[in-house]
Image (cartoon, rainbow, N blue to C red):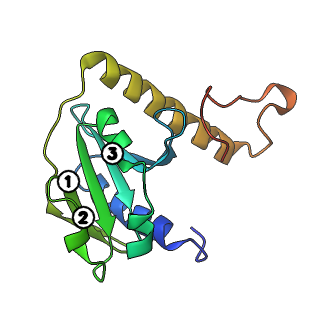
């Protein structure tokens, strides 16, 4: 990955590496619903859906007005911050991950709020399509829609 990644992207990289050690696969910048884009969505070995929001500063956290909208799209919700972040700002009823660009540690497990079966099925489908589109773009970087290339999902923001 390039060295010029933004601080939140570096946190996301460390989070994804750590979650893989727990047998969770991850995607970044997934759109669960129009107007929302999560930093990291992770899918566990039993179909668990976790969302991790990466915050690189106090201002980054205090300016986020959408995070509560993410709760209905996952079984567990976490914040990922670096070791210098003032964690007392984060709600106690959410998970906490301390991360850097290379790894992370879950320091507070998020409470579980199981997704309804239909919502879980929809999220696993979105996860699979998002991951497949990213892989296809990696293999074939031509612009979407050119020569019959894949179109983005309705409501999904352009990357």
Q: Tell me: 20 left or right of 31.
A: left
What residue is pinned by disc 2?
Answer: 90
**Secondary structure of residue under mark 2:** loop
Relative to 43, 91 lies left or right = left
Are the residues flagged by discs 1 and 2 in contact, CB closer than 8 Å? yes
Rate crowding at label 3 as few (under 14), some (14 to 19) or many (20 or more) other CA atoms within 10 Å.
few
SS class of the residue under badge 3?
Answer: helix
Circle 3 sits on which residue? Answer: 68
Between disc 3 and disc 1, the foreground one is 3
Residue at mark 3 to residue at mark 2: CA–CA distance: 12 Å
Q: Could you say which is closer to the camera, residue 6 or residue 65?
A: 65
Could you give the CA–CA distance between mark 1 and mark 2, rounded to whole angstroms?
8 Å
Q: Quadrant of the N terminus?
A: bottom right
Q: Nearer the viewer, residue 6 or 59?
A: 59
What number of labels is visible?
3
Q: Position of residue 10 (x, y in %)?
A: 46, 70
Q: Quadrant of residue 58?
A: bottom left
Q: Give the x, y percent position of residue 114.
A: 18, 30
Query: Which comes sooner in the sequence, label 3 or label 2?
Result: 3
The residue under the point 24% across, 27% down is 115
Of the two numbered discs 3 and 1 on the same chain, state the one appearing first in sequence: 3
Q: Is residue 130 above or below residue 52?
A: above
Residue visible at 30% across and 78% down in the picture = 85
Front residue of 131/140: it is 131
Q: Dot 1, how many residues are within 10 Å of its Cα: few (below 14), some (14-19), or many (20+)? A: some
Whole-percent x, y for residue 143 in the image: 80, 41
Q: Is residue 26 visible?
A: yes
Dot 2 alpha-carbon crowd within 10 angstroms: few under 14, some 14 to 19, many 20 or more: some
User: Does the image show residue 57?
Assistant: no
């Amino acid at each position: 990955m390039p060295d010029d990644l933004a601080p939140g992207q570096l946190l996301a990289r460390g989070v994804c590496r750590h979650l893989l050690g727990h047998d969770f696969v991850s995607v970044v910048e997934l759109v669960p619903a129009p107007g929302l884009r999560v930093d990291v969505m992770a899918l566990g070995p039993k179909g668990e859906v976790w969302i991790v929001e990466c915050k690189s500063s106090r201002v980054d956290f205090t300016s986020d007005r959408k995070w509560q909208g993410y709760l209905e799209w996952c079984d567990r919700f976490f914040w990922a911050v670096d070791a210098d972040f003032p964690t007392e700002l984060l709600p106690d009823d959410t998970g906490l991950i301390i991360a850097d660009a290379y790894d992370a540690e879950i320091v507070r497990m998020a409470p579980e709020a199981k997704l309804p079966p239909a919502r879980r099925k929809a999220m696993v489908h979105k996860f699979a399509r998002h991951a497949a589109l990213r892989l296809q773009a990696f293999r074939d970087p031509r612009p979407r829609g050119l020569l019959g290339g894949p179109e983005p999902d309705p409501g999904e923001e352009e990357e």
